[in-house]
Image (spheres, rainbow, N blue to C red):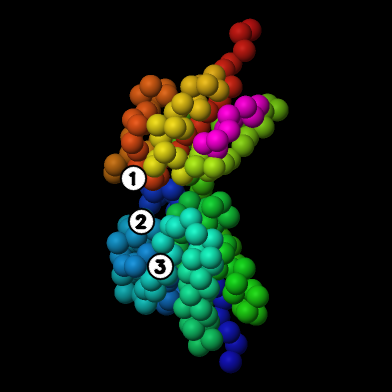
Amino acid sequence: MKKGIAYGVGVGPGDPELMTLKACRLIRENDVIALPGKDPKETVAYKIAAAVVPELADKELVPVYMPMVMDRQVQRENHRKGAETIAKYLDQGKNVVYLTLGDSTVYCTFTYLQAILEEMGYETELVSGITSFCAAAARLGIPIVEWNEPMHVMPALHKLDRGLDQEGTCVLMKSGSHMKEVKDILRASGKEVQMVEDCGMASEKVYRSVEEIPDEAGYFSLIIAKDPKEEK
């Protein structure tokens, strides 16, 4: 029997209208949909996709629970369990479509499963989605980069012990739980700062300066910090 293919499919940042046609097609064409969480229908990825592809509710929904912990050994064990869960369906000749927020190549849990599945001999495919930082920039009405500016995308959590001295635009993700410390770094950087929380969702909030940003913010908080425009 030919084994199934595991697809890592980005569903975009939050606005259902930003899902790609390919993501919608893969959901419609396949019966097994995996989602990152204990209860698939409670995941953000499910709620985004179901708004565009209502038949998702009738699919076989597979929970792949990988709690956010800092212990690398525990992470590896959870990734292995998730890959083995998906492999059971692939062995039956069924494709598995794993839905993930944003893009499937940016800080995506599926890429850990992908590596394990490929080691096990299974075929995988990544399907791109609109990234959170592109959607946030569009919501703010600003370009992320212009002309010859570089861009740096980083998890804010790992910048807490360093300054933000990179030239160009810095995109800070995963910053909500340590926002107070992140704000201190942003102030010291001299950059022009804006943030979108829950971009594209009903709970979306926009902040136009460091001072507007609250000390406590949600997990889906994305900061764009740009060098000040030079005087002409």
Specify the quadrant that holds the C terminus: top right
Q: Are marks 1 and 2 in contact (CB under 8 Å)?
A: yes
Specify the quadrant that holds the N terminus: bottom right
Decide whether the magenta segment is chiefly helix, strand or loop: loop
Query: Residue 5: x, y in percent?
Result: 57, 76
**Nearest to viewer (mark 1 / mark 3):** 3
The disc placed on residue 65 is 3
The type of residue carrying mark 3 is Tyr
3D distance between C-alphas at marks 1 and 2? 10 Å
The type of residue carrying mark 2 is Val
3D distance between C-alphas at marks 1 and 3? 23 Å
In the rendered structure, which segment of residues is drawn in magenta? 159-171
* Image label count: 3
The disc placed on residue 201 is 1
SS of the residue at dot 2?
helix
The answer to whether residue 217 is above or below residue 15 is: above
Residue 138 visible in the current orientation: no
The answer to whether residue 76 is above or below residue 139 is: below
Looking at this view, name the residue that lies furthest to the right.
Answer: 148
Identify the residue position indicated by label 2 in the image.
44
Query: Residue 42: x, y in percent?
Result: 30, 62
Return the disc, 3 or 2, that comes first in the chain's sequence.
2
3D distance between C-alphas at marks 3 and 2? 13 Å
The answer to whether residue 70 is above or below residue 118 is: above
